Image (cartoon, coloured by chain):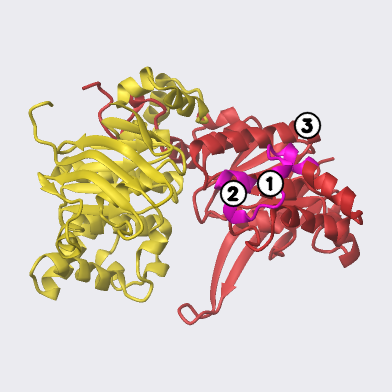
Chain colours: A red, B yellow
Amino acid sequence: MSLLDVKQISHTYKTNSMFKPHHERTVLNNISFSIDEGSCFAILGSSGAGKSTIGKIILGIEKPTQGSVQFMGHDLYTIDKKLKHQLRRDLQVVFQDSYSSVNPRMTAEQIIAEPLKNYEKLSATEQKRSIIELLEHVGLSKNDLMKYPHEFSGGQLQRINIARALSLKPKLIVLDEPVSSLDMVNQTLILELLNNLKKELGLTYFFITHDIKAAHMLADQLGILEKGQLVEVFNNPSEFFTSVHPVVHQLRSAILAEHPSSRTIRSNKRP
Amino acid sequence: MPAAKPVLEVNQLSVRTKTKTLIHPLEFTLQKGEILGLVGESGSGKTVTSMAIFQLLHKESMVIDGSIRLNGQELNGLPEKQMKTIRGKDIAFIMQNPMNAFTPVYTIGNQFVETIRAHIACSKKEALELATEALANVNLPHPKTLLSLYPFQLSGGMLQRVMIAFAACLHPKVIIADEPTTALDVHNQLQVLRHLEHIRATYGTSILLISHDLGVISEMADYVAVMQNGHLVEQANVFDLFDSPQHAYTKQLLDARPTLHMTPSTREVSYESS
């Protein structure tokens, strides 16, 4: 049985703002997919395709207009509050912007301790020990415990966010563009960390990205989202390079050259 | 091109605060119609370098030494009043985050006209015509309607194209593009890069392209300068840099990027199948 089953979800945002009164916008249209335990489902699409909305729906924080989300066999939007509270500890998230995902007035220790305080009743020493363990897991050390967010680089802070997401040993982590605001070196390092953690802890990822290279490093399955429609799902992400679907083709032709000799915007001839 | 006179000549440029040296003396030149890529990870001093060229650093708290010559004219230490006539006209800036680069309370047209009229004497109507033309040049649909919109009504990709139109409309000699595509998705990224190339090819604009994305650099640059911790560690032709990086840090950067292991041939195939 798959860990997460998304069945025919559609979602419509209604706005009633000063500029656009009674405006309806369908952002997701009949989306279905499932994720097996221990695998990574990456969703690729341009901005505004509805990627993050799917993420919110999976996390249980945005009820879809239609359809259902089954997590570990329970429907996230019909179960009672108590069960939902229990299920939520197995659902964690890492966002794109590492700085705005943390409280600037908390130390790294306090940031990671928050979910532990909510769910686990640990003694102060036990809690500290598990926080240090988590920090080491993501490549930081106990010297970082007392630091505030502004003392970390973007990459380091994203590691803190990952540690926080890991703290309750969740089943599924939604990764919403976790590396998009980092430079290339840090992107690779964080993706490698996520890949190792996935193998080591048997984690399941829902990976939202617009970067095919990042998707390729992590994904077992690759879904292509375009204007709220899941236009393709590849069980082997390499099929991305051979698919003839026009949307896939467009995404593929936007990949930048890895070497100037294959570039297309400017002349690829040596001067 | 040894004989040609460089458009931008940076010599022994260094920036330091009271406690720390942000940029160690570095030098590079930019010829007409050339793109120089400036790479390095976050915090390596790429943006500080560009701000120094633009004379936007806080002069009381930072010491900027060395010379920055634009067509032979020294910019470092130039009075603010004179610098204002150069910024926007001779040397333009494209920022990473298009959302923060505009004033939210004025329309695009309003801001466009302000920029144009700050540099050339013309009527509001002429300025609007120029703006419409500039927006059409970056393939923005309905440029006339666009001028009456506010920045928040446009998407990030569109705003970035508007900013490029701003930067290009007075045909500056140099454009400094600081991570122009980092906030955009792949499709918009490609479009923005194509527009930059179009401007370069049409007006002979030289571009200082700052990016941590080696894909952007390999597509666009003629020459590449690699920065690490405020030092310029390597400077080379883009082909040489990718083929045989000399400095250990450059090698590290090239190794660190996520790759698809696509050969040039698979890439061509994917293009031909359109």
In the picture of the structure, the residue carrying the numbered disc 1 is: A144
- Give the answer, above or below, for where B114 lies relative to B224: below
A145, A134: nearer the viewer:
A145
* Amino acid of disc 2: Phe
Name the magenta segment's main secondary structure. helix
Q: Give percent across and percent down for residue A212.
A: 53, 37
Tell me where the magenta segment starts and ends, as one range.
A133-158
Which numbered disc flags the more N-terminal residue, 3 or 2?
2
A48, B177: nearer the viewer:
B177
- In the rendered structure, find residue A200 and report the number of the disc placed on it: 3
- In the rendered structure, find residue A92 and report the number of the disc placed on it: none
Q: Secondary structure at mark 1?
A: helix
* Amino acid of disc 1: Asp
Mark 1 chain: A
Which numbered disc flags the more N-terminal residue, 2 or 1?
1
Q: Hey, which quadrant is residue B25 in on the image?
A: top left
Mark 2 chain: A
B142, A169: nearer the viewer:
A169
Q: Give percent across and percent down for residue A168.
A: 82, 49
In the picture of the structure, the residue carrying the numbered disc 2 is: A152
Q: Secondary structure at mark 2?
A: loop
**Residue reaching furthest to the top:** B244
Q: Residues within 10 Å of mark 1 (few under 14, many from 20)?
A: some
* Amino acid of disc 3: Glu
- Give the answer, above or below, for where A165 lies relative to A1: below
Estimate the spatial distance between the alpha carbons at disc 3 and disc 2, rounded to whole Å: 26 Å
Q: Give percent across and percent down for residue A268.
A: 28, 25
Residue occupying the point 25% across, 73% down: B110
Residue B140 in sight from this viewpoint: no
Residue A6 highlighted magenta (yes or no): no
